[in-house]
Image (tube, helix red, strand yellow):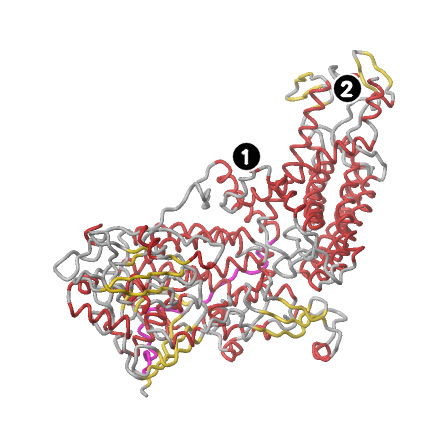
Amino acid sequence: MIDTLITIADWPGVKWVILVLMFALPVASLLTWAERRQSAMIQDRLGPNRANIGNIRLWGILHFVADVIKMIGKEDFIPGNAHRGLFKLAPILALVPVLIAFCIIPFGPTIYPHALFDVISTDALQGMIIHGGVANDLTWADQITLQILTIDFGLIFYFAILTFANYGTTLAGWSSYNKLALLGGLRASSQMMSYEVTMGLSLMGLFLIMGTLEPGEIVRQQGPNPWQWGIVLQPVAFLLFFSAAIAETKRAPFDLPEGESEIVGYFVEYSGLRWGMFFLSEFIEIVFISMLITSLFFGGWQVPFLHDDGLYLFGTVTEMNHITVSLLRILSFVMKVFFFCWFQLMIRWTLPRFRPDQLMQLGWKRLLPLALLNTMVTALILLWIQ
Amino acid sequence: MDTVTQSEKTTVGRATVVTVKREPSQTTSFMMTLIRGMTVTMRHFFSNLFTKTQTETLEYPEEKIPYPERHRGLHRLMKRDDGRVRCVACMCCPTACPANCITIVPAETDDPSVEKYPAVFEIDELRCIVCGLCVEACPCDAIRMDTKLHAAPVEFRGDAIETKTSLLERGGLSHAIQAGKGSDWRESEQ
Amino acid sequence: MSERVVLGQKNPEDLEASNDLMTINMGPSHPAMHGTVRLVLQIEGERIVASDVQPGYLHRCFEKEAEYATYNQVFPYTDRLNYLSPMLNNVGFALAVETLLDITDDIPLRTQYIRVMVGEISRITDHLTCIGASAMELGGFTVFLYLIKVREWFYELLEELCGARLTYSYVRIGGVSHDLTENFTIRLKDILARTKNMLSETETMLTNNKIFRDRMENVAIVSKEDAIAWGFTGPCGRASGLDYDVRKDYPYLIYDRLAFDVPVGEHGDCYDRYLVRLEEIKQSMSMLDQCMEQIEPGPIVVDDLRVSMPAKKEVYNTIEGMIAHFKHVVDGVKVPAGETYGFTEGGNGELGFFIVSDGTGRPYKCHVRSPSFTTLQALPFMIKNALISDVIPTFGMINMIGGECDR
């Protein structure tokens, strides 16, 4: 019975529903409120704090519910000359790829439901757990991987999938029959294409070091020691990837496709829920980028000095059972993700917007050569070590 | 016609011309930009997160900034000691009003010392530009704008017209003494 | 703009003749156009080949309305010219009329100081809004709100002084309507100190900000010759190296008693306009400090019943006062027949009032030389061959105020 449940829980579809629809999506929705509150605090305002159900006010956290209700209630306006099919398709194309891309994110460590209250160790020997003092072989039903899909080409899959989001914005601009939207769509496609190159190349060094493209494996390899994390091994790659990733989310200082004071944005003609999908996809991308950066550069769910069987600190070992370790690690992942979400919002409210040509110059003339250089230097160092 | 000129070009002033300096563009970088910007935004963020010392906005309907003494708000009509309207329908305020928002229909009273009173006194608050010239133009301290109230939003244009009744409801007793030795304008009330 | 040469880019002259251009409307309903001006741009990609500026969406017949108003009734209208610095308009109009009345020298010293002080406060609010709004349109929303917060302090101070936040109607012919409040100087000093802090934070966030500088530098360069040719005055003209400031060259009121710097730029680009405005805020603050030291008690209106309204005590209790009061309300200030051009340094440049009087209490003709209008006419020239994104800082730094431009 329990084995069946575990097997069901390990199905990718079930995990997707639990991890994406019940974790990532709510976090993204909360971010819409968090951004407004955070920007308010940065700007010496109070921000939205009044949405309430009865007396439950909770600093206005319920604002995202109010937003959804408002967006449902709004007229779904489609311009007369718009290409209706593409116009309706575009928001879906913007939203769905990001939701799919979550499949590769390692949300937490592998959990062994049979050994929840035991002290286990998998660090020494992969695939073996010490269960009640006896080393057992693992079966498929014995573990739940907190990663929806474990695929060897994980990050390539992400790059491929996220390119579809590009279609969403470009088609939205094109199908709206609006010149400003068209400009926004064109800006979006050129920007995302340029920055995807940097994004991919900036990770090359990391791939070389880790020898894998699978995020879960990258996290496991980084280990619990912070000096083995991606940020220490590849600091330049982190900066490049972070800049390129923010550019991918189309938010300030890279919010040129939107550029509300210049060209109003690729979604000028959208209203109601369709606009909400663009809006939400932006925030989901923030969450996604935070998760990816956490996984690749900050040890993912790893807690500093926390091994599978306990905390190794100052030469002493504090033993912990499996469930404590797992919960700590999931918490660590969530905290890191929240930190990077917060950090991205801070950047968004600190920096002004680029100009298109300067954006291209930054992407092609500075970030891309740097990424190439980083790859080469990493490769040379690896060669020298070997 | 004569042409009057303002003044001749002089060099009496103590002004000096300086050139604004800009730092060489090499001194800027994206990282420094981010760090400098973040120091400011973080400082504001954390000080507003834990205390409200820097927060400028208020929880509006519950908290309000008190209006200053001289604030110009909705009009009111002042009363005499016996409760009658102080206005003598001299038509100064409609004349002074740049927006023509005051309508007065004068009528005669039985009181020989007063002669006239406004049978109709209406102010269209939608037309009013709240300049305060009517208060300045009043020779008998009958109209004032010190209610510290706003004109409320209305659904129909007609609802925005303040009638004599509503103006008098807000009005108080004016102690300014006329035609004799008396206090200064509003002096006695302060 | 020499760096903007791109391989394969067509010759601007060829482009203008071609039919492949996209016409795009910016405004009047556009976030950057402040709702009051329409730009019709001919673009090739994102490059602007030709543009047409169409102001007039905020035309409210100021000049014609003024002909039907007594001189004192014009003040509420002047509030609505440059609504970011109404006091400067108030003062400018009062000075023009007083020049016609030939009572410029009789204005009490205290009044002159008060006028300078409220004027400089208005100049600060004007520049704050300009810098803040430009920063906002470039994506720096935080800076905008910091500066608006500062502006709000000044607005509250002026509200305490004259009863309204924005539409002050404070100045009168021959004086001002209220004396300073008791704690005016204390509050002003407090506000100035806080403003200095916020300004330094703004500078930290903007002045050496790489992105901001990239957006502002070498954008819309106007040479000194061009600036003179287009009639630039004020911060825009000074940024182009034109060291013309009415306060310096034709000192009015008590500006000759104040020591201040007139900042001029070297390059004439948007960044210089930003720097000049920032420096002018600081100079205005130092001027306010000097005024607070120098100001002395005294009357606030001219002691002349033909020019200024009698005190209320007189009106209530003496027949002369009552008659003078009625003459004022009904006829207005009788200004001798003649014409004058009174010019002061407004928020955006030389603010001139050309007034023709036929001897009655109402102007025969009142024309405004609005600095925004003359600067705005150069916009097509400034954004030619620029990118659409360059319109934003250029337009922002011109600080075109619809009320003043369209009158």
Q: At which x and y percent is residue A42?
A: 53, 45
Which amino acid, mark 2?
Ser
Q: CA distance from mark 1 to mark 2?
A: 45 Å
As drawn, C148 above or below C403: above
Label 2: element kind: loop
Which amino acid, mark 1?
Arg
Q: Please give the residue where the numbered disc 2 appears in the rendered image.
A: A121
State whether residue C44 appears in this view.
yes
Label 1: element kind: loop
Tell me the chain of label 2. A
Picture quadrant of residue B122: bottom left
Magenta part of the chain: B4-29
**Farthest-out residue, bottom:** B1
Mark 1 closeness class: few <14, some 14–19, many ≥20 residues within 10 Å: some
Q: Earlier in the sequence, mark 1 or mark 2?
A: 1
Report the predominant secondary structure element of the magenta stretch.
loop
As drawn, C120 above or below A157: below
Left/right of residue A377 with respect to residue B181 in the rendered view: right
Q: Please give the residue where the numbered disc 1 appears in the rendered image.
A: A57
Q: Quadrant of the N terminus of chain C?
A: bottom right
Left/right of residue C1 with respect to residue A88 in the rendered view: left
